[in-house]
Amino acid sequence: MAKKTTLKPVKAVAKAVATMARVAKKGTAKVTAPAKKGTARVAASVKKPAPRAKKHVFFFGNGKADGDRTMRDTLGGKGSGLAEMTNAGLPVPPGFTISTDVCSVYYAEKGRIPASIEAEIAENLRKLEKAAGATLGSNENPLLVSVRSGAKFSMPGMMDTILNLGLNDQAVDGLKRRTQNGRFAFDSYRRFIQMFGNVVLEIPKDAFEHELDAVKKARGTAQDTDLDETALREVVDRYKKIVRTRASRDFPQDPHEQLRMSRDAVFRSWMNPRAQEYRRIYDIPDHIGTAVNVQMMVFGNTGDRSATGVGFTRNPATGAKEFYGEFLVNAQGEDVVAGIRTPQPISELEKVMPKAYRELREITTRLEKHYKDVQDFEFTIQDERLFMLQTRNGKRTGYAAVVIATDLVAEKLITPKDAILQIDPEALSQLLSPGFDPKEWRAIPVATKGLPASPGAASGHVVFSADEAVKWADQGKPVILVRRETVPDDIHGMFVSQGILTATGGMTSHAAVVGRQMGKPSIVGAGDLEINEAARQFSVNGQTVKEGDFVSFDGLTGEVKLARVASKPSEILQVVNRQLPEDQSDIYRRFNQILTWSDKFRRMGIRANADQPDQSEMAYGFGARGIGLCRTEHMFFGEGRIPIVQRMILADNEPDRRKALAELLPMQRGDFYGVFKAMHGEPVTIRTIDPPLHEFLPKREELMVEIAKLETRQDSSEELEKKLALLRRVEQLHEFNPMLGHRGVRLGITYPEITEMQTRAILEAACQLAKEGLKVTPEIMIPLVGHVKELRDQKAIVDRVAADVMKEQGVKVNYLVGTMIEVPRGAMTADQIAQEAQFFSFGTNDLTQLTFGFSRDDIGKFLRIYQDKKILDKDPFATFDTDGVGPLVRMAVDLGRRARPDIKLGVCGEHGGDPASIHFFEKVGLNYVSCSPYRVPVARLAAAQAALSVRVGD
Ligand code: ADP
Ligand code: MG
Ligand code: MG
């Protein structure tokens, strides 16, 4: 979204305040966030404006800090890291952190900071001036500071930082005199005006870039670093003019005013659209707010003995144990990640500044040991002196997460339990994403190579803007977002893309960081790409690629090819499907290790929702021990079955219907036999027919078209008759609300012969296996029960048929009869239902649908607006609504257990594979969760995390 071009801070505050107020209104309810960061995010309580006496500002400096690593809620991630590093005696420029509470106060007070907090800030500023030996606003010896945002969860590039604050027309001369370096002084000043102008006065960056480019052009230089003092003075003058015309005011010369305005701008940036979008994607609550860090500046732009850089203690793409990062000599902060100059790999630093390099290695190694996790750090070297500016647990790809966690355990830095809590369960699902077939991939020539920022195979249509990406993706087309460099505003486009490809930037550029975090294959810095975003095309080594053309790339090698390439299953999937021996896959071994550890800690069982033997086999391979939902209707769509199913539906008398059912019987028996066998004797829950019957018939409109066509032909009377009969039946079956219509148990009640056939098929398969020596326990599940008498009716049929079959077959098998709890009435009367049901499986999809009254097929039309207006945080069909639907589940669990203490309880809705929802199911004490086969690894890990971080009964 484009920034406003005129100065309207007041309006901006008003808007943000209104939104925050809505958020705050939500009251003090616990907000449950998924365990993306291990356990830390399970429950964060809503913050209320703090009482007077509370401390709001926390100092760090001179080897001592008011805060520490445990205070991330109050200080934000950056502030707590700075405090912790200060306490550890590391070289950190002194400063202070204005707490996240103040952010809430700022919004509650409609953009004003109360005098008591202003006084606390002033007091800390004096302390900082003393520590720094310089004064804010002094012309001779000016204190310069950075104003840095920092929320509890890092949001790379989402909010804004201002450097060199404290400079004005006089102080810049003082800085020059004191450092004997005019170039440096004016470079710092022009950067400050640019950042302040953009962040605080909301003037678009381009306006400044444009002036800088003009000066560079006039001097015939390419790099910022080539500009001398005179040139930079001119840049400063031009920037000040830009401020005057764009913001209708002069650039503020009073450093105290600069500081207040910058602080408020950081608070405002919390509610900017891209930050909100980011929080939505990563499930970060809006109400937690950001802290503001005010810190003495150190300078990487004083000359060739200075530098600035960022790095990781291990490779965040592959997990390899290697020092990893980038730096730029004679540069400041954002230069490295902004992709303006291409940075050097950090290994080069050893050559140019060996002492600082050695110290950096030593410090970061210590930090990794201290935090027991990979550190992502930022540093600046001023005249060969190293300063640490940030450290945090590094974001990483799913692949790296698994490699790093298993390595850290092997190095005895952490325990298996720590490893489990450290890995985002989604990482495991990333590991299952496909790659290219190596042979096919090799056969296509390489168009160019870039930096391999985030692994994975990506193939899709080229688009050149985030908005286009969304447009194409909405049409179901795979897209590759190609940009010169990405900016935080692109986040929505990156989210929907198969992969991200940029022409500039290094391994720590925005595209790289965000790509890795999203698990999107990404290549950055593919310098051969000449991108013309306006013309929507790029050229590379003489070939032109237009919007919509196909591009494929491999994010692990950095190779880009101009073709559409099909991808193939991941290495892990190959092992699971026995196409690759286990001992040939290092990543499988690690993946399996994580899951084996998880199994030791989890309480809940993990089952899969699977309908076919091959799916069941795969689910078993992923570690599912049982099927929680086998949807029999999916089997009706199998090869050659639909005509029989249609005959059954079209029958207008019972004998005809039974005839069709008799034909389906052996097919269903075969299906069940296969599924039982694939589950190696683990329990299998089979649901009797559920959807409205019209789903098996052609659509009314299509039939009418066909009939119209047949009517124009002479020789088609017989076919025409058939179609007309079909149309009549379709019209008879038409329902206004099919999801609330003739479906689920209601079908079994009106057509008992269907339940009979399905029971027979299930029991015959089980008996056959029993004779072959495999003991299986079918669990027959009746859907959509709201009244105990519905279940009683069906159970009588099941028991009767089962007894018949066992007598015929001369074997006995154990089976259970139970029901789904998915209709609110079923949950409310669960004690009565439990008289009949031996198990409950919560069908949370329908239960959510029926509790909210939201049709899950139509929610897409308004969900986004609900989220924008903060009515709903999350899609309740993806993340279980613990507040509203949760009580029904709790009630049904209680009533069910009271009536039948050994009742088996599980969940088979989509939520069964969602980590945040799994935490809730752990709390209510379900026996198992069931999810799609691919989610099984995620569920195993999430269930272990849940068991380690919440208690049954909470
Ligand atoms: P982000 O959260 O976007 O990373 P930061 O607040 O970390 O923003 O600031 C970005 C960069 O600005 C830092 O990596 C660092 O290089 C530079 N920076 C911030 N504060 C200072 C400071 N006090 N002295 C020198 N450089 C700073
Ligand atoms: Mg930073
Ligand atoms: Mg249902």
Image (cartoon, rainbow, N blue to C red):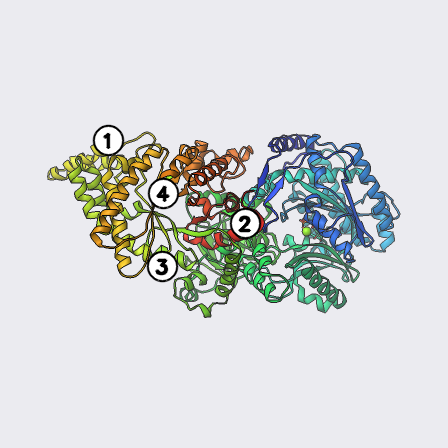
- Above-or-below relation of 208 to 316: above
Estimate the x, y position of residue 168 in percent, counting from the top left: 81, 43
Q: Which residue is mark 3?
A: 680
How far is disc 2 from disc 4 in space, using C-alphas? 27 Å
Q: Where's the C terminus, which quadrant?
A: top right
- Depth check, front residue: 359 or 468: 359
Label 3 sits on a secondary structure element that is: loop
Label 1 sits on a secondary structure element that is: helix
Q: Which of pointers 2 and 4 indicates the residue nearer the eye? A: 4
Estimate the x, y position of residue 679 in percent, counting from the top left: 36, 57
How far is disc 2 from disc 3 in space, using C-alphas? 27 Å
- Above-or-below relation of 22 to 672: above
| Residue type (three-letter) at the residue carrying disc 3 | His
| Residue type (three-letter) at the residue carrying disc 1 | Gln
Can residue 169 be seen by looking at this rendering?
no
Q: Which residue is mark 1?
A: 732
Pointer 4 local density, CA inside 10 Å: few below 14, some 14–19, many at least 20: many
How far is disc 2 from disc 1 in space, using C-alphas? 49 Å
Left or right: 662 as drawn, with respect to 168: left
Q: Which mark is residue 946?
A: 2
| Residue type (three-letter) at the residue carrying disc 4 | Gly
Left or right: 305 as drawn, with respect to 832: right
Q: Which mark is residue 818?
A: 4
